[in-house]
């Protein structure tokens, strides 16, 4: 299956993607995680992306689209993939369509995780991520680790993302409304959009998404 996950920052895309990718046996491709890996390895791409991310702005398309394409062309993505955080504006969605068409492929569904703004702000403020593995995501209230600051899964140190400050979150939400939300209509017009209410227990949201994909 080829699936796109959309939703505001903090909606739970990364959290859900980890479970959905495992259930569906497809790789989870997160452009945010790819950028953060490049930043921690101090690559040229990471150095170019960092200032945009720290400000809460989108990284320019000429950097992002090539990086996403390279990842989708890896052998493990031949059988399908779950895209998290890409596409993030209409020109990226159009570029994805061109890429898929050239490869004789198409998307199966676009899942839109719907959560109100107050809740995403709370989710982001309490989020903590493991330094060893970005799929190990916690929350100080909603998904607290047994020992504060320590990953339950691997013992790694938990940290707060640089772009999770209150001011940057406000910019990210604004960018989401102005630049990313238009892709919802774009995919609605293609008959691919499925809205998933994303409030409630993590496992319940995963179940809603799995049920929607079976239809
Ligand atoms: P990215 O990493 O994609 O960030 P984002 O879209 O802002 O999304 P988040 O990672 O903040 O949230 P999420 O929805 O994954 O939520 P999570 O599961 O962690 O992008 C970062 C930056 O990279 C962008 O700002 C941009 O600069 C750049 N970038 C990336 N892609 C790009 C692109 N295509 N083009 C240009 N630039 C790009 O959950 C949040 C918290 O809530 C966690 O603590 C979790 O434990 C908790 N939680 C999750 N589900 C629940 C639940 N059901 N109940 C209670 N708590 C929950
Ligand atoms: Zn860990």
Image (cartoon, rainbow, N blue to C red):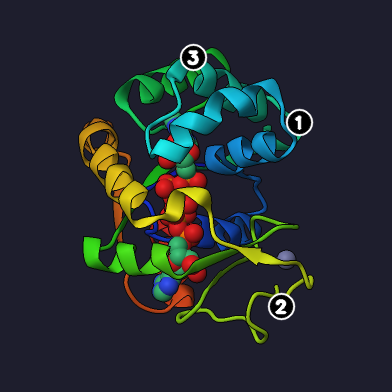
CA–CA distance in space, label 1 to label 2: 31 Å
Q: Residue at x 52, y 62 (%)?
A: 15
- Check disc 2: other Cα within 10 Å, few if <14, some if 14-19, many if 20+: some
Q: Which residue is mark 3?
A: 62
Give x and y (percent) for residue 71: 66, 29
Badge nearest the viewer, 3 or 1: 3
Asked if residue 18 can be seen in this view, the reply is: yes
As drawn, 131 above or below 36: below
Q: Secondary structure at mark 2?
A: loop
Q: How many marks?
A: 3
- Check disc 1: other Cα within 10 Å, few if <14, some if 14-19, many if 20+: few
- Are dots 2 and 3 in contact, CB under 8 Å? no
Figure quadrant of the N terminus: top right
Q: Secondary structure at mark 3?
A: helix
72, 31: nearer the viewer: 31
Q: Residue at x 40, y 66 (%)?
A: 125
Q: Which residue is mark 1?
A: 75
Disc 3 C-beta below 8 A from ligand 1: no
- Are dots 3 and 1 in contact, CB under 8 Å? no
């Amino acid at each position: 299956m080829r699936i796109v996950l959309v939703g505001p920052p903090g909606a739970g895309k990364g959290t859900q993607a980890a479970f959905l990718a495992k259930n569906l046996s497809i790789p989870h491709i997160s452009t945010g995680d790819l950028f953060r890996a490049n930043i921690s390895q101090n690559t040229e791409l990471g150095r170019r992306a960092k200032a945009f991310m720290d400000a809460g702005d989108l990284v320019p398309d000429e950097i992002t689209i090539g990086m996403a394409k390279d990842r989708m062309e890896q052998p493990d993505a031949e059988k399908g993939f779950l895209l998290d955080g890409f596409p993030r504006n209409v020109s990226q969605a159009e570029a994805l369509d061109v890429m898929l068409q050239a490869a004789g492929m198409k998307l199966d569904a676009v899942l839109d995780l719907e959560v109100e703004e107050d809740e995403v702000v709370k989710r982001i403020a309490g989020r903590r991520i493991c330094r060893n593995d970005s799929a190990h995501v916690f929350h100080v209230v909603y998904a607290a680790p047994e020992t504060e600051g320590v990953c339950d899964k691997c013992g790694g140190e938990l940290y707060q993302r640089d772009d999770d400050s209150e001011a940057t979150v406000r910019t990210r939400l604004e960018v989401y409304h102005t630049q990313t939300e238009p892709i919802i209509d774009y995919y609605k017009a293609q008959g691919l959009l499925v809205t998933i209410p994303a409030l409630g227990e993590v496992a319940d949201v995963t179940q809603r998404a799995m049920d929607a994909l079976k239809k």
